[in-house]
Image (cartoon, coloured by chain):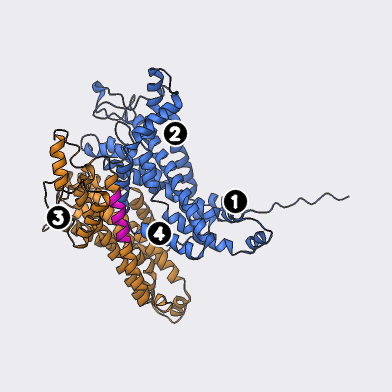
Amino acid sequence: MSTPVPVEKGSSLWRDAALRLRKNHAAMPSLVIVALIMLACLVLPSIPGLLADPNVQDLPNKNMSPGSGHWFGTDHLGRDILSRVLFGGRISIAVGLITTFVSVTIGVCWGALAGYIGGRTDALMMRIVDILYALPFLIVVILLGKTIEPFTGKLTEWTVDLFAGSGSTTAKVNDTRTWVEPITTLVPLFIAIGTLSWLTVSRIVRAQVQSVSRMDFVEAARSLGLGHLRILTRHILPNSIGPIIVYTALTIPGVMLFEAVLSFLGLGVKPPNSSWGILIEEGSNRMLSNPWLLLFPSVFFSLTLFSLNFLGDGLRDALDPKSSKD
Amino acid sequence: MFRTLISRFLQGLLVLFVLFTVTFFLIKALPYGPFQTEKAIPDHIREKIESYYGLNESIGTQYTRQLGNLLKGDPGVSLRLEGRPVIEIISQAFPNSLQLGIVAMAVAIVIGIPLGVLAAWKKNSSLDYASMAIAMIGICIPSFVIGPLLAENFGRRLEWLPVMGWSPLSPASWVLPAITLGLGTAAYLSRLTRAGMLETLSQDFVRTARAKGVGSMSILTRHCLRGGLIPAVAYIGPAFASIISGSVVIESIFVVPGLGLHFIKAIEVGDAPVILGIVMLYGTLIIIANFATDLLGLWLNPRLRSSN
């Protein structure tokens, strides 16, 4: 018997996309940079004893320029800038990821329903999107954030109760509070930005769902008697995943920029919690005497946005070659 | 085409109504009010003040009263600035914001569109890569980093331009705020222009023109510019909206006495008439800008006219 001919492995959407992405000279370095910055900001602050406490003041060592001991220098209160940048980055990245998740979830559901149902419902849902598009975005987000803000107190109490248990000691309650509070105070930001930034995603998803649901395999699924929900979630959405991934990647830098703008205006993350927006604001007030205060957070922030945008563009070229025009 | 314009106009009115309603109820849901933060006021006096401004009426009454006032073109008096009419506040601050916005928009167009045309013309050359890298930097480095850097270098070190402040008649004081505000929009415009020009340059009629011996400069300006600018022109409406939002940030960096500063202060104390006045003004401007963009698009792109 002759030796069996090796079966050539068929190429899939993902293999093609990965191949195209790997050939992209802008996207691959960006991927590495994003991965490194995320790793540094998410992992290093969690290792106890590695970084100085970002909020501990050390007045004898204030305004030190970058050097050994304090690699990125210290600020006017003697706080270590390296650990402030990394801890701040953790908050900025967390806001970026969670808010993007909120916004993409809303956008995918809205767009998929509108595109699948069609007709008058579709027209109404898309008209609502048009109306929201025409609102002065920043201004509505500021207003919405301010309105939700007071509920964070209650949310903090409730979450602390949940994790510490109602009958526990004061020490334990305080202990829980120290890690719960920084997260719950960000919730207004997640909601305010997330509920208003899903519009583009919903338009993209709707267009995609519309074109996929006219394809023959959907007709086949329908004639087999599958329910609407099953057709939508098992057949249409998986075939629309490319654009969804691309716009998720492009939403993250937009949302992070937004958080920074709000924090810069004093309306987002509140000190002593730091985020890149807050650090840049503090740095720009003292950049004449201590330029490193502005330099390091700006470099980290801009590099992250830069890489995320290039990565998003690269993903678009890789996953959605037809739509990439620029 | 006429019907489309009418429906766009009606849709604009609907947007304004929704904007008013959303803003009104968000302000009412604020946990603080203009007279609740000052604890020194005894309760019976505070009630008197609130009834003077009509704040003790039912929500429905307040809603219809505010809506009626706005329809008459008068948002009422400020609660924070001791009864100054909102109209007066806006008429003092808005010219500064408008001037800043217009100059910034001009900066964006003057930088963004030529850069995009150039990049498309010399596609895949180092010129193309350089201008697209500049555009990416313009998108990624936020205005609140660029602003302080420009102020530091051109204001304090070189002393060429004022570091902050705004005077309507001295163009030197416009330069830094307007450049900072317009740069991000310039970056987007250049990317859109490049994409639009590339698509037009790859059309068959361009090849025909080239075969007939038309010079490359003439192809660019006479044959392609009008069609290639369509995506960039369609972005001018949204760009206007982003410049309005951005001016809130720029005004606080460069201390420009515009509406953005009033808005942030009004939000912090819950000064409903001022917030509503500014939000409705901005909303109206954005709708007008979008409408004008649609008209420009129709003028540039005859294909839109025929297809009803």
Residue that label 1 marks = A14
Q: Characterize the local packing of mark 3: few (<14), some (14-19) or many (20 or more) Cα atoms within 10 angstroms.
A: few
Q: Are marks 2 and 4 in contact (CB under 8 Å)?
A: no
Residue B181: give x, y in percent of width and height: 26, 53
Q: Colour of chain A?
A: blue
Residue that label 4 marks = A128
Q: CA distance from mark 3 to mark 2?
A: 45 Å
Residue that label 3 marks = B172
Q: Nearer the viewer, residue B231 or A220?
A: A220
Q: CA distance from mark 2 to mark 1?
A: 28 Å
Q: Nearer the viewer, mark 3 or mark 4?
A: 4
Chain on which label 1 sits: A
Residue that label 2 marks = A42
Q: Characterize the local packing of mark 2: few (<14), some (14-19) or many (20 or more) Cα atoms within 10 angstroms.
A: some
* Above-or-below relation of B255 to B118: above
Residue B258: give x, y in percent of width and height: 18, 52
Q: Secondary structure at mark 4?
A: helix
Q: Amino acid at mark 3?
A: Ala
Q: Quadrant for the C terminus of chain B, please.
A: bottom left
Q: Amino acid at mark 1?
A: Trp
Q: Nearer the viewer, mark 2 or mark 4?
A: 4
Marks 3 & 4 on one chain: no
Residue B37: give x, y in percent of width and height: 19, 37
Q: Is residue B230 magenta?
A: no
